[in-house]
Image (tube, grey):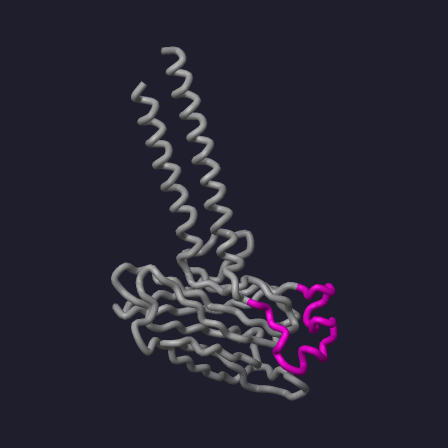
Amino acid sequence: MNAVPRRFAAAAALASAAVLAAAGPALAHVTVDPQSAPGGGYATVNFKVPNERDDASTVKLEVTLPTDHPLASVMPEPVPGWKVTVEDGKLEKPIEMHGEEIDEAPSKITWTADGDGIAPGTFQRFPVSVGRLPEDADRLVFKAVQTYDSDEVVRWIEVPEEGGEAPDSPAPVLKLTASEDGHHGGGSDGSSDADDAEPAAETSAADDGGDGTDSTARVLAVVGIVVGVGGLAYGAFAGRRRNA
């Protein structure tokens, strides 16, 4: 009779380890939150940066902005304890913004810690208002470089391929969707003039959104396995007691 409880404990331990394994990787890399926004307008996105080290703090984040679909408007929200700079770069092909032709656009955002940075076991969000989001693309890739106070540098620059395996160091990706009226762009009333005025109608990123949902789904799936294993073990144990 003692063998069954031992088997149950072993199965539960293995299932618990699977829960941790499933939940961990989804939170391990730099991501953009929310993971999608309507094309043609403006959005506020968060670059979400977790600290993966036990003995070092993150003290710098560098995000390279896409050059194939440049963003003319990039406005970081101040983050206490961090300095932020936005670098501009020359465009190979000028773009039009509010009726004007622009041959320069933001190319890189750098956040540098004034204090302790992102401590082990914590994460930080860096909000940025961006626009106008392109209508002729299905995603924007933001390559990121994370620096620790130990001088370690982690490059989140691998571009995920649709249908392929997830890379070890994926770059943050913002998926672009159609607006509610079925067209890219437009304000809440469906007119493009609303967006031309100001980047006011933005996609909110206050909640944890995309990657949190994926992580929760994985955890719930594995918890279901744990419950199933527990039920089978308990049934076997009860059967043995009746037979005894």
- Residue furthest to the bottom: 100
Q: In this view, does 77 lie above or below 57?
A: below
Left or right, 122 with reference to 209: left
Q: Quadrant of the N terminus?
A: top left
Q: In which quarter of the image is residue 120?
A: bottom left
Q: Quadrant of the C terminus?
A: top left
Q: Who's the residue at 45% across and 60% down the image?
A: 170
Res 188 visible: yes
In the image, 212 versus 171, the foreground residue is: 212
Res 153 visible: no
Residue 73: percent from the left, percent from the top?
56, 80
Q: Who's the residue at 61% across and 78% down the image?
A: 199
Q: Does the magenta stretch include residue 181?
A: yes
Q: Is residue 84 above or below residue 229?
A: below
Q: What stretch is highlighted in magenta?
A: 178-204
Residue 167: percent from the left, percent from the top?
44, 56
Mostly what secondary structure, the magenta segment? Answer: loop
Q: Who's the residue at 72% across and 76% down the image?
A: 192
Left or right, 133 with reference to 192: left
Q: Is residue 39 magenta?
A: no
Residue 140: percent from the left, percent from the top?
55, 68
Q: Who's the residue at 63% across and 87% down the image?
A: 101
Number of residue marks:
0
- Residue furthest to the top: 243
In the image, 107 versus 112, the foreground residue is: 112
Residue 152: percent from the left, percent from the top?
29, 67
